[in-house]
Amino acid sequence: MKAELIAKEKKTIHELDSLFKPKSIAIIGASTKDLSIGNVIIKNLVHYGYKGPIYPINPKEPEVRGIKAYPTIFDVPGEIDLAHIIIPSKFVPQMIEDCGKKGIKSVIINSAGFSEMGEEGMALQTAFLQKAKQYGVRVFGPNCQGIINSDPELKAYCDFTFTFPEPGSISIVALSGGVGAFIMQSVFDLGIGMRMYASNGNACDVSISDVVSYYGEDDGTKAIILYTEGFSNPKEFMDVAKVVARKKPILAMKAGRTEEGAKAAASHTGSLAGVDIATELIFEKTGMLTFNNEEEMCQTAMAFATQPYPKGNRVGIITNTGGPAVIATDELVSKGLQIPALSERAKNILKTTMLPEASINNPIDVVATGGGKHFRSALDVLMDEEGIDAVYINFVTAPFTDTDEVARQIVEVNKMKKKPIVCNFMTNMSMERYQQTAKIMKDGGVPCYAFPTTAAKALGALYKYHLVRSRNIGEAKLFSDINKKQAETILIEAKKEGKTFLSSKQVFNLLGAYKIPLADWRISDSPYDVAKAAREVGFPVVLKADSESLVHKSDMGGVVVNLKNMDEVLTAVEKMKNKFDMKDLKFLVQKFLPGGRELIGGVSAKQGLGHLLMFGIGGIYVEVLKDVAFKIAPVTEVEAKEMLSSIKTSKLLDGVRGEKGIHKESVVEIIQRLSQLVCDFPEIREMDLNPIMAFENNAMVVDARIKI
Amino acid sequence: MKAELIAKEKKTIHELDSLFKPKSIAIIGASTKDLSIGNVIIKNLVHYGYKGPIYPINPKEPEVRGIKAYPTIFDVPGEIDLAHIIIPSKFVPQMIEDCGKKGIKSVIINSAGFSEMGEEGMALQTAFLQKAKQYGVRVFGPNCQGIINSDPELKAYCDFTFTFPEPGSISIVALSGGVGAFIMQSVFDLGIGMRMYASNGNACDVSISDVVSYYGEDDGTKAIILYTEGFSNPKEFMDVAKVVARKKPILAMKAGRTEEGAKAAASHTGSLAGVDIATELIFEKTGMLTFNNEEEMCQTAMAFATQPYPKGNRVGIITNTGGPAVIATDELVSKGLQIPALSERAKNILKTTMLPEASINNPIDVVATGGGKHFRSALDVLMDEEGIDAVYINFVTAPFTDTDEVARQIVEVNKMKKKPIVCNFMTNMSMERYQQTAKIMKDGGVPCYAFPTTAAKALGALYKYHLVRSRNIGEAKLFSDINKKQAETILIEAKKEGKTFLSSKQVFNLLGAYKIPLADWRISDSPYDVAKAAREVGFPVVLKADSESLVHKSDMGGVVVNLKNMDEVLTAVEKMKNKFDMKDLKFLVQKFLPGGRELIGGVSAKQGLGHLLMFGIGGIYVEVLKDVAFKIAPVTEVEAKEMLSSIKTSKLLDGVRGEKGIHKESVVEIIQRLSQLVCDFPEIREMDLNPIMAFENNAMVVDARIKI
């Protein structure tokens, strides 16, 4: 599968070069009307300085914006790499065929009127896609903005937006054009250079996964900003993102995280959306950095564009003003960073280099009158300090300081790229003097923020990426002692019987086939058999009425626990027989397991993604606190352990108030076996393991429900 | 007390006019050296256009920055309202005396070298304060920046910072000059006008409370931004803030919220700091709007400067682009706002006024080609819609739209001030065309944000202020059936005995004096008395060994529960007698109360504030989840109810899984009686009520510990 993936990537890269690095561009639907899309795109290409030939296609006009126009693409003398299509939707299928015939490799369909417009539009989309496949034309869009490549050798602005980014190392991909545009604008306003941009609207062919994969292979892209409202093929995205996120940071935001937001998303994209925890889990599993705040995401990108990643969480703070260091400390600590004490070595140096009123602890307060040499000495000390992984600076441009000199010193140290630096640069940008200082900082690649919390958040994100890269969840374990054939037989049988829910017997046998430990059980259909079963499993026992028409058996008196002898068992059987007058009534006899901690597990299938696994502590913990953890299958051992440790009440698993803790290893194994089971059988829709009883030395499933 | 408070306010206002509205200003320590504070302040006063006379005081120079200087203040011909003091700290006490003699009403001491510099500095501070009291001079600082008043009639820039704010309605007060300066800068950068500014450093006389009270009375101040790292007199602040926050919003941030942050704060202010939940509780009790992010606080201020407050949580969204509406919806909903469906009336109007491709649900998508008239119609509809309390707009400046016209329409509706409007204005400000649009929006008082989440957060804050103003916690109930005299006697007795912890008998009698319900109890010192006690309270009983030297009695076998008859009681007494060989050994006999829900209550005294009350569910809930709620005493009935409902596991109080809920009214009453008790007796340092057993029809304290 990995080889396939790599092959797919290679193929994607090759094909998408015509989209992201077009050698020539045709605008089908070029218009002489100002402000029309067919005009703006040509204007933008020219304004941005596109290096290749531009071919306006217009049946009537001899030229558009002073550039020679052609009646059809077939009249264009040279080859066309990429074509914009800005004609009414009904003409698009034929046009794609023409593009194929002309040998055009990629098209950007700006026109709307497809899948977002109901059935008729969907039919058109299907029609042109078929033509595209037939001729090997890659389609970007429809109903989209386009792409931008800021490479100075190319300068392709294939888009009708109005921000003209400086070349740089951040690449952006956004499902929503509106959001993509303001992210690009924000990156521009922050003075961060941009590498590539893509906003693919309906995304009928070139997907967000394709774009992320392409950015991943692009040497000019140092970090990726991703905005989406969902994934049409989450599994594919996960496979791609897993590879890319190890190479470069992906800063990601998924809107529609509330029910109401998802509704709003559905109304404007027509499909993709849905409130799901799945996207968040995808982001986590693949190691993406997630944001709920697009302003913070853009600001953070500034640090990723210029800084190395810290190798640990220990921050040295240099400040020339008190309060902002307090604010920064609060935020850094909240993000898991530390502000450790400095070594004696460091303090001894600072004692000789700092002003007498300076504070030589961490934060190092160089005080407002501290100049370039004081900042420089503090920086040098922190860069040499073994116990420090990153540097945070508060730099207020005090009027009595040579602020340019301070900036030059910071820049010199920054250029060594030894440890990451972020700076809260507090100044009045309407004063020329400080504009100059700001320019030195910016040109020197120091990420400058106007607020301490914002700067601290950015450093927190750099650290988070260090954690993401260091985290190795490993591969999912494949247990070889399972009996896949048996499980398959059970599921085939259940399907043949037309069942939605497996019978108790099928449930226990299926779990048993994957060696998921079960409370010893027997299913019997006569009092005589029940007695035999009770003897076999050993007293005390639990008796459960078992019938397909009995769903909430415990609420209806269909469960009796702690039956201590044969008399009690037979009395209970008689009572149930009288109570439940069903033809298929059987009795489930299980070993009664008092004490122990009640846990729950669960599985649910997610369209296009596989299964989500759930774990939690049962009873009031799940009911009152909804204290559960989710992961996407396959779940590795590391992830299974994280499921146990990430719930709020995880301390209960270790034992509190003199109670013994539970045998976590057993639970971790149950989760992994469950993961293997559902990965082997995608037809399993839902599972509830409730309860799983956990003890000091083992854990076992007591009751379960499986839906196919 | 209220009358006192009002009187104090009136007095404060009168006195602080000389500080915030000075008719003339002397600069003691005026300097001819550029960049020195004694020079910069004069420069700033002149540059900002101060309307009154400026008197530089310098023993040697005939003039400073071209303004006639005087050797001493006594040489100044006219009256001096306010003096800056920028001379070495050791000369300050004498100078304050001189100021007093000259009749100067307020001084701003910019000089450092006082309480922040250890004992010697503290002595100087005490010395000048004594002189100030003697002559009735109000002192601002020392070790501070100063104040600014932007009133066009005054233009007092009594500060050495470098931001020159436009007049406006936001007033700022900050403990830290560094933070104050960048907040002011940010308010300036956001184009929000500022009214007054104050950063009071060591705050030895004029406190943050005084400033907030002054801003509260100032008609020109519409909202207040407050930054602090703690309060020297929290009780005073609380009394002031409670009054002011009802009149106008106070946007507040307290740094030092983490242990490390508090440490950083302590190192630069020398005092105030401390990790405490108290500040947060003060903010909550007084109805302030709290922030952990100073950037968000400043951005939010923009909406408060111009907009009315919503009367409910129902938002109408107008958008001309899809994605940003999704992001906004997510954030609005997270802040407790709703995006309700529109009425048929509204939809019918929109059907006729919108473009055919527009969406006439909520969000109303006027689409990118929608112009001024479409925005206007959507706005009019929402302003008339009964079910809508506020309007959120996404306005991207699409190149094919007359964006100025859209802006003009928004401004026209905004000027009616019918309902609050916030706007996510997405544009490229480097293009002249859009600068013009932005100017129309800004001049029209529309709060414009560059990101949907940011705009949504601002609207969320406006709504929160509506909630704050609507919330009436009422007055604390004073129970008249209590026996204060008895409680006093108990406490006097305990103090006489030199006790830190009250004896069991004292604890139960004290709680009993305030009619806090107790599990029926007797204290006996002989087996005979124990038997009698057990008969009186009725079986089953609990027996507890009671001795001052026995602290963790339950861990040591000093508690036996569920004794069902006399035999069991006497056996237990004998065992305990053998086990605990103490002279003062007594026996506490209590009614055994099985079942019920185990709750905990607590009290701790906070320096300068009074007491914090705590409530939670006992056992693992407090141990594992730390699920407790705090309030500052006196606690009203509303607040006591909030304590019960605000814990995460509050559902347990209602009963889950078939269990009966508890009698909340009884617990609410216990909390209120406890509050009255500790307010009556500030000498109580700590109380633990653990457990309080709560049942279906009542609740009672079973065990307690009281520290004085």
Image (tube, coloured by chain):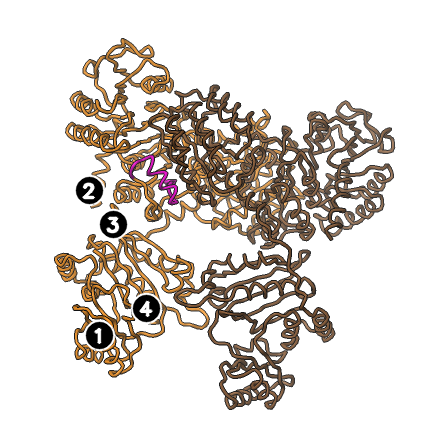
Chain colours: A orange, B brown
Q: Residues within 10 Å of mark 3 (few under 14, many from 20)?
A: many
Circles 4, 3 touching at the beta carbon (< 8 Å): no
Q: Read off the residue under disc 4.
A: A693
- Residue B265 screen position, x and y as percent: 61, 49
Asked if badge 1 and badge 2 are on a common chain, one would say yes
Between residue A438 and residue B82, name the one nearer to us. B82
**Residue at point 72% right, 74% down?**
B493
Residue at figure coordinates x 32%, y 13% from the top left: A32
- Same chain shared by disc 4 and disc 2: yes
Q: Chain of mark 4?
A: A
Query: Is A145 included in the stretch rendered in magenta?
Result: no
Gap in angstroms between the C-alphas marked 1 and 2: 58 Å
Tell me where residue A378 appears, x and y as whole percent. Answer: 57, 42
Instruction: Identify the secondary structure beneath mark 1.
Output: helix
The residue that disc 3 covers is A610
Indicate which disc, 4 or 3, sits on the residue closer to the N terminus.
Answer: 3
Dot label at residue A63: none
Nearest-to-viewer mark from 4 and 1: 1
Give the amino acid at mark 2.
Glu
Disc 2 target residue:
A4
